[in-house]
Image: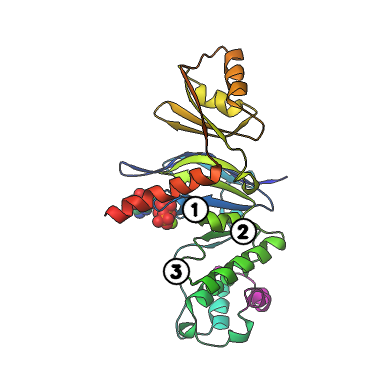
Amino acid sequence: METVLSTDKLTKYFGKLCAVNRLDLEVKRGQVFGMLGPNGSGKTTTLAMLMGVTNPTSGNFTWFGEPATHHTRKKIGAVLEHPIFYPYLSGQKNLELNALIKGVDPARIGSVLELVELAPRKDDKYRTYSLGMKQRLAIASALVSDPIILILDEPTNGLDPMGIAEIREIIKRIAAEGKTIILASHLLDEVQKVCTHFAVLRKGNLVHSGPVDDVGKGEETVEVIAYHDDLSHILHEFRGSLSVKNENGKFTVHLRENFHAIDLNKFLFEKGIIASHLVTQKKSLEKQFLEILQESQDVSHKM
Ligand SMILES: Nc1ncnc2c1ncn2[C@@H]1O[C@H](COP(=O)(O)OP(=O)(O)OP(=O)(O)O)[C@@H](O)[C@H]1O
Ligand SMILES: [Mg+2]
Protein backbone atom coordinates (compact mmCIF):
# COMPACT_ATOMS: atom_id res chain seq x y z
CA MET A 1 0.00 0.00 0.00
CA GLU A 2 1.17 3.52 -0.83
CA THR A 3 2.77 5.46 2.01
CA VAL A 4 1.04 8.80 2.36
CA LEU A 5 2.96 10.20 5.31
CA SER A 6 6.28 9.24 6.76
CA THR A 7 8.02 11.07 9.60
CA ASP A 8 11.65 10.56 10.51
CA LYS A 9 12.70 11.53 14.04
CA LEU A 10 10.39 14.52 13.89
CA THR A 11 11.19 16.76 16.87
CA LYS A 12 9.88 20.05 18.24
CA TYR A 13 11.24 22.03 21.17
CA PHE A 14 9.57 25.11 22.63
CA GLY A 15 12.55 26.58 24.45
CA LYS A 16 13.66 23.75 26.71
CA LEU A 17 10.36 21.94 26.52
CA CYS A 18 10.41 18.96 24.21
CA ALA A 19 6.87 18.82 22.79
CA VAL A 20 7.58 16.12 20.18
CA ASN A 21 10.53 13.77 20.51
CA ARG A 22 12.04 11.88 17.54
CA LEU A 23 8.69 10.78 16.23
CA ASP A 24 8.60 8.06 13.57
CA LEU A 25 5.18 7.56 12.02
CA GLU A 26 3.96 5.94 8.86
CA VAL A 27 0.48 6.42 7.45
CA LYS A 28 -0.67 4.44 4.43
CA ARG A 29 -3.32 5.30 1.90
CA GLY A 30 -6.86 4.54 3.03
CA GLN A 31 -6.01 4.32 6.71
CA VAL A 32 -7.90 6.21 9.36
CA PHE A 33 -4.94 6.96 11.54
CA GLY A 34 -5.48 8.02 15.15
CA MET A 35 -2.94 10.00 17.15
CA LEU A 36 -3.93 9.17 20.68
CA GLY A 37 -2.47 10.87 23.72
CA PRO A 38 -3.37 12.82 26.84
CA ASN A 39 -3.44 16.64 26.95
CA GLY A 40 -0.04 18.08 26.20
CA SER A 41 1.36 14.90 24.64
CA GLY A 42 2.26 16.69 21.38
CA LYS A 43 -0.59 15.83 19.03
CA THR A 44 -1.44 19.36 17.91
CA THR A 45 2.23 20.28 17.65
CA THR A 46 2.80 17.27 15.39
CA LEU A 47 -0.14 18.21 13.17
CA ALA A 48 1.05 21.83 13.06
CA MET A 49 4.46 20.68 11.77
CA LEU A 50 2.85 18.40 9.19
CA MET A 51 0.70 21.31 7.97
CA GLY A 52 3.67 23.67 7.76
CA VAL A 53 2.22 25.92 10.47
CA THR A 54 5.33 25.51 12.61
CA ASN A 55 8.83 24.31 11.73
CA PRO A 56 10.33 21.16 13.24
CA THR A 57 13.38 21.71 15.46
CA SER A 58 14.89 18.64 13.82
CA GLY A 59 13.84 15.57 11.86
CA ASN A 60 11.91 15.33 8.62
CA PHE A 61 8.69 14.22 7.09
CA THR A 62 7.44 13.45 3.62
CA TRP A 63 3.99 13.51 2.05
CA PHE A 64 3.66 10.98 -0.79
CA GLY A 65 7.39 10.35 -0.54
CA GLU A 66 8.26 14.01 -1.20
CA PRO A 67 9.24 16.85 1.12
CA ALA A 68 6.26 19.11 1.84
CA THR A 69 5.68 21.79 -0.77
CA HIS A 70 2.83 24.04 -1.72
CA HIS A 71 1.90 21.37 -4.24
CA THR A 72 1.77 18.43 -1.77
CA ARG A 73 -0.18 20.54 0.76
CA LYS A 74 -2.92 21.06 -1.81
CA LYS A 75 -3.75 17.37 -1.43
CA ILE A 76 -4.40 17.82 2.30
CA GLY A 77 -7.47 19.24 3.97
CA ALA A 78 -7.15 20.13 7.63
CA VAL A 79 -9.42 21.11 10.47
CA LEU A 80 -7.11 22.45 13.13
CA GLU A 81 -8.26 23.89 16.42
CA HIS A 82 -10.06 27.12 15.51
CA PRO A 83 -11.52 27.40 12.03
CA ILE A 84 -12.52 30.94 11.09
CA PHE A 85 -15.97 31.66 9.72
CA TYR A 86 -18.01 34.84 9.48
CA PRO A 87 -20.96 34.79 11.92
CA TYR A 88 -23.26 36.91 9.74
CA LEU A 89 -22.77 34.85 6.57
CA SER A 90 -24.55 31.59 5.84
CA GLY A 91 -22.77 28.23 5.83
CA GLN A 92 -22.93 28.19 2.04
CA LYS A 93 -21.48 31.73 1.71
CA ASN A 94 -18.73 30.95 4.21
CA LEU A 95 -17.67 27.94 2.14
CA GLU A 96 -17.75 30.01 -1.06
CA LEU A 97 -15.58 32.65 0.56
CA ASN A 98 -13.13 30.03 1.87
CA ALA A 99 -12.90 28.43 -1.57
CA LEU A 100 -12.19 31.82 -3.10
CA ILE A 101 -9.48 32.62 -0.55
CA LYS A 102 -7.85 29.21 -1.03
CA GLY A 103 -8.22 29.35 -4.81
CA VAL A 104 -10.29 26.17 -4.85
CA ASP A 105 -13.06 25.29 -7.32
CA PRO A 106 -16.39 25.79 -5.45
CA ALA A 107 -18.13 23.08 -7.50
CA ARG A 108 -18.08 20.56 -4.66
CA ILE A 109 -19.69 22.81 -2.04
CA GLY A 110 -23.16 21.35 -2.59
CA SER A 111 -22.03 17.75 -2.26
CA VAL A 112 -19.84 18.34 0.81
CA LEU A 113 -22.74 20.12 2.54
CA GLU A 114 -24.81 16.99 1.84
CA LEU A 115 -22.04 14.79 3.17
CA VAL A 116 -21.91 16.63 6.52
CA GLU A 117 -25.71 16.86 6.63
CA LEU A 118 -25.84 20.63 6.55
CA ALA A 119 -27.65 20.97 3.24
CA PRO A 120 -31.02 21.83 4.85
CA ARG A 121 -29.36 24.56 6.95
CA LYS A 122 -26.92 25.89 4.35
CA ASP A 123 -28.64 29.28 3.99
CA ASP A 124 -28.84 29.95 7.74
CA LYS A 125 -26.33 32.31 9.29
CA TYR A 126 -23.27 30.71 10.83
CA ARG A 127 -23.98 32.34 14.21
CA THR A 128 -27.22 30.37 14.48
CA TYR A 129 -25.40 27.03 14.15
CA SER A 130 -24.90 24.66 17.07
CA LEU A 131 -21.34 23.72 18.02
CA GLY A 132 -21.76 20.39 16.23
CA MET A 133 -22.95 22.14 13.06
CA LYS A 134 -20.00 24.55 13.23
CA GLN A 135 -17.65 21.60 13.47
CA ARG A 136 -19.37 19.90 10.54
CA LEU A 137 -19.02 23.09 8.49
CA ALA A 138 -15.30 23.12 9.28
CA ILE A 139 -15.02 19.54 8.01
CA ALA A 140 -17.00 20.50 4.89
CA SER A 141 -14.66 23.43 4.29
CA ALA A 142 -11.63 21.14 4.40
CA LEU A 143 -13.27 18.80 1.89
CA VAL A 144 -14.21 21.34 -0.80
CA SER A 145 -10.84 20.96 -2.50
CA ASP A 146 -11.35 17.14 -2.64
CA PRO A 147 -8.11 16.44 -0.71
CA ILE A 148 -6.55 12.98 -0.58
CA ILE A 149 -5.97 13.37 3.14
CA LEU A 150 -8.12 14.90 5.83
CA ILE A 151 -6.53 16.00 9.10
CA LEU A 152 -8.75 16.49 12.15
CA ASP A 153 -7.66 17.74 15.57
CA GLU A 154 -10.01 16.59 18.36
CA PRO A 155 -13.06 16.71 16.09
CA THR A 156 -15.60 15.94 18.84
CA ASN A 157 -14.21 18.20 21.57
CA GLY A 158 -16.93 20.00 23.49
CA LEU A 159 -19.82 18.27 21.74
CA ASP A 160 -22.71 16.49 23.41
CA PRO A 161 -23.20 12.72 22.86
CA MET A 162 -25.50 13.31 19.90
CA GLY A 163 -23.03 15.74 18.26
CA ILE A 164 -20.20 13.29 18.90
CA ALA A 165 -22.11 10.42 17.26
CA GLU A 166 -22.88 12.60 14.20
CA ILE A 167 -19.26 13.60 13.70
CA ARG A 168 -18.09 9.99 14.06
CA GLU A 169 -20.63 8.85 11.46
CA ILE A 170 -19.42 11.55 9.07
CA ILE A 171 -15.78 10.57 9.58
CA LYS A 172 -16.64 6.97 8.77
CA ARG A 173 -18.49 8.09 5.66
CA ILE A 174 -15.51 10.15 4.48
CA ALA A 175 -13.22 7.16 5.11
CA ALA A 176 -15.58 4.92 3.14
CA GLU A 177 -15.11 7.28 0.17
CA GLY A 178 -11.47 6.22 0.24
CA LYS A 179 -9.89 9.26 1.87
CA THR A 180 -6.98 8.87 4.23
CA ILE A 181 -7.73 10.47 7.58
CA ILE A 182 -5.37 11.53 10.35
CA LEU A 183 -7.16 12.27 13.57
CA ALA A 184 -5.83 13.49 16.92
CA SER A 185 -7.78 12.51 20.00
CA HIS A 186 -7.35 11.99 23.71
CA LEU A 187 -10.17 9.43 23.76
CA LEU A 188 -9.29 5.75 23.38
CA ASP A 189 -12.93 4.99 22.77
CA GLU A 190 -13.05 7.46 19.85
CA VAL A 191 -9.93 6.01 18.27
CA GLN A 192 -11.28 2.47 18.68
CA LYS A 193 -14.58 3.45 17.07
CA VAL A 194 -13.36 5.33 14.02
CA CYS A 195 -9.70 4.46 13.35
CA THR A 196 -8.05 1.54 11.59
CA HIS A 197 -4.53 2.30 12.86
CA PHE A 198 -3.14 4.44 15.63
CA ALA A 199 -0.11 5.77 17.45
CA VAL A 200 0.02 6.57 21.14
CA LEU A 201 1.95 9.64 22.27
CA ARG A 202 3.04 10.40 25.77
CA LYS A 203 5.03 13.53 26.60
CA GLY A 204 6.05 13.80 22.96
CA ASN A 205 7.24 10.20 22.74
CA LEU A 206 5.76 7.48 20.60
CA VAL A 207 4.88 4.65 22.96
CA HIS A 208 2.94 2.43 20.59
CA SER A 209 1.78 2.17 17.02
CA GLY A 210 -0.21 -0.48 15.22
CA PRO A 211 -3.62 -1.60 14.03
CA VAL A 212 -6.60 -0.78 16.24
CA ASP A 213 -7.59 -4.44 16.03
CA ASP A 214 -4.64 -5.29 18.27
CA VAL A 215 -6.11 -3.39 21.23
CA GLY A 216 -7.38 -5.85 23.77
CA LYS A 217 -5.28 -8.61 22.22
CA GLY A 218 -2.07 -10.00 23.65
CA GLU A 219 -2.35 -10.15 27.37
CA GLU A 220 1.25 -10.76 28.34
CA THR A 221 3.70 -8.01 29.16
CA VAL A 222 7.34 -8.60 30.04
CA GLU A 223 9.67 -6.25 31.88
CA VAL A 224 13.26 -6.51 30.69
CA ILE A 225 16.51 -5.00 31.89
CA ALA A 226 19.72 -5.92 30.10
CA TYR A 227 22.96 -4.11 29.43
CA HIS A 228 23.11 -3.59 25.71
CA ASP A 229 23.32 -0.33 23.73
CA ASP A 230 20.86 -1.39 21.10
CA LEU A 231 18.32 -3.16 23.31
CA SER A 232 15.36 -1.06 22.21
CA HIS A 233 16.01 -1.89 18.57
CA ILE A 234 16.50 -5.60 19.30
CA LEU A 235 13.31 -5.78 21.35
CA HIS A 236 11.39 -4.19 18.49
CA GLU A 237 12.89 -6.80 16.17
CA PHE A 238 11.43 -9.65 18.17
CA ARG A 239 8.57 -11.20 16.19
CA GLY A 240 6.38 -11.40 19.27
CA SER A 241 6.62 -7.70 20.19
CA LEU A 242 3.44 -5.70 19.90
CA SER A 243 4.90 -2.64 21.60
CA VAL A 244 8.06 -1.70 23.45
CA LYS A 245 8.19 0.97 26.13
CA ASN A 246 11.37 2.28 27.74
CA GLU A 247 11.44 3.90 31.14
CA ASN A 248 14.95 4.74 32.28
CA GLY A 249 16.40 1.55 30.87
CA LYS A 250 13.60 -0.71 32.06
CA PHE A 251 11.80 -1.97 29.00
CA THR A 252 8.22 -3.16 28.98
CA VAL A 253 7.41 -5.39 26.05
CA HIS A 254 3.82 -6.15 25.22
CA LEU A 255 3.63 -9.55 23.54
CA ARG A 256 1.44 -10.73 20.74
CA GLU A 257 -0.96 -13.55 21.36
CA ASN A 258 0.75 -16.94 21.71
CA PHE A 259 4.11 -15.40 22.61
CA HIS A 260 5.50 -15.72 26.10
CA ALA A 261 8.36 -14.44 28.21
CA ILE A 262 10.30 -17.63 27.57
CA ASP A 263 10.24 -16.94 23.79
CA LEU A 264 11.58 -13.45 24.38
CA ASN A 265 14.27 -14.71 26.73
CA LYS A 266 15.37 -17.30 24.17
CA PHE A 267 15.45 -14.64 21.41
CA LEU A 268 17.63 -12.34 23.50
CA PHE A 269 19.93 -15.19 24.47
CA GLU A 270 20.40 -16.09 20.80
CA LYS A 271 21.42 -12.46 20.20
CA GLY A 272 24.01 -12.85 22.95
CA ILE A 273 22.06 -10.78 25.45
CA ILE A 274 21.51 -11.97 28.99
CA ALA A 275 18.68 -10.20 30.79
CA SER A 276 19.42 -9.15 34.34
CA HIS A 277 15.72 -8.74 34.97
CA LEU A 278 12.83 -10.47 33.21
CA VAL A 279 9.39 -10.39 34.81
CA THR A 280 6.05 -11.29 33.30
CA GLN A 281 2.96 -9.20 33.93
CA LYS A 282 -0.50 -9.57 32.52
CA LYS A 283 -2.06 -6.39 31.25
CA SER A 284 -4.01 -5.68 28.09
CA LEU A 285 -3.01 -2.86 25.75
CA GLU A 286 -6.33 -1.25 26.48
CA LYS A 287 -5.53 -1.09 30.17
CA GLN A 288 -2.09 0.35 29.45
CA PHE A 289 -3.52 3.10 27.26
CA LEU A 290 -6.17 4.00 29.78
CA GLU A 291 -3.40 4.36 32.35
CA ILE A 292 -1.41 6.61 30.01
CA LEU A 293 -4.47 8.73 29.23
CA GLN A 294 -5.34 8.90 32.91
CA GLU A 295 -1.88 10.13 33.95
CA SER A 296 -2.26 13.66 32.63
CA GLN A 297 -5.78 13.96 34.00
CA ASP A 298 -4.46 13.09 37.45
CA VAL A 299 -1.91 15.87 37.02
CA SER A 300 -4.47 18.41 35.80
CA HIS A 301 -6.83 17.57 38.66
CA LYS A 302 -4.07 18.37 41.09
CA MET A 303 -3.52 21.80 39.51
N1 LIG B 1 3.38 27.72 21.05
C1 LIG B 1 3.83 27.05 22.11
N2 LIG B 1 4.75 27.59 22.94
C2 LIG B 1 5.21 26.90 24.01
N3 LIG B 1 4.82 25.65 24.35
C3 LIG B 1 3.91 25.06 23.57
C4 LIG B 1 3.36 25.72 22.42
N4 LIG B 1 2.48 24.88 21.84
C5 LIG B 1 2.48 23.76 22.59
N5 LIG B 1 3.33 23.85 23.62
C6 LIG B 1 3.62 22.81 24.63
O1 LIG B 1 3.96 21.62 23.93
C7 LIG B 1 3.40 20.47 24.57
C8 LIG B 1 2.54 19.72 23.59
O2 LIG B 1 1.39 20.50 23.31
P1 LIG B 1 0.31 20.07 22.25
O3 LIG B 1 -0.67 21.18 22.14
O4 LIG B 1 0.98 19.62 21.01
O5 LIG B 1 -0.37 18.81 22.95
P2 LIG B 1 -1.72 18.04 22.58
O6 LIG B 1 -1.37 16.58 22.61
O7 LIG B 1 -2.30 18.58 21.32
O8 LIG B 1 -2.65 18.38 23.81
P3 LIG B 1 -4.26 18.58 23.89
O9 LIG B 1 -4.83 17.20 24.03
O10 LIG B 1 -4.42 19.37 25.14
O11 LIG B 1 -4.71 19.29 22.68
C9 LIG B 1 2.65 21.00 25.80
O12 LIG B 1 3.50 20.86 26.90
C10 LIG B 1 2.40 22.45 25.45
O13 LIG B 1 2.32 23.23 26.62
MG1 LIG C 1 -4.13 19.45 20.90
The kind of residue tagged 2 is: Val
The residue segment tinted magenta is 101-117
Give SS at disc 1: helix
Mark 2: few/some/many CA within 10 Å (<14, 14-19, 20+) = many
**Of tags 2 and 1, which is closer to the observer?**
2
**Of tags 1 and 3, which is closer to the observer?**
3
Residue at numbered disc 3? 158
Q: Does the magenta stretch include residue 71?
A: no
Q: Residue 154 location in percent, x, y?
A: 49, 61
Q: Residue 226 location in percent, x, y?
A: 47, 18
**Mark 1: C-beta under 8 Å from nearest atom of ligand 1:** yes
Residue at numbered disc 2? 194
**Mark 2: C-beta under 8 Å from nearest atom of ligand 1:** no
Q: In this view of the protein, can residue 54 be seen by the observer?
A: no
Which quarter of the rendering shows the C terminus?
A: bottom left
Give SS at disc 2: helix
Disc on res. 124: none
* Quadrant of residue 76 within the rendered picture: bottom right
The kind of residue tagged 1 is: Leu
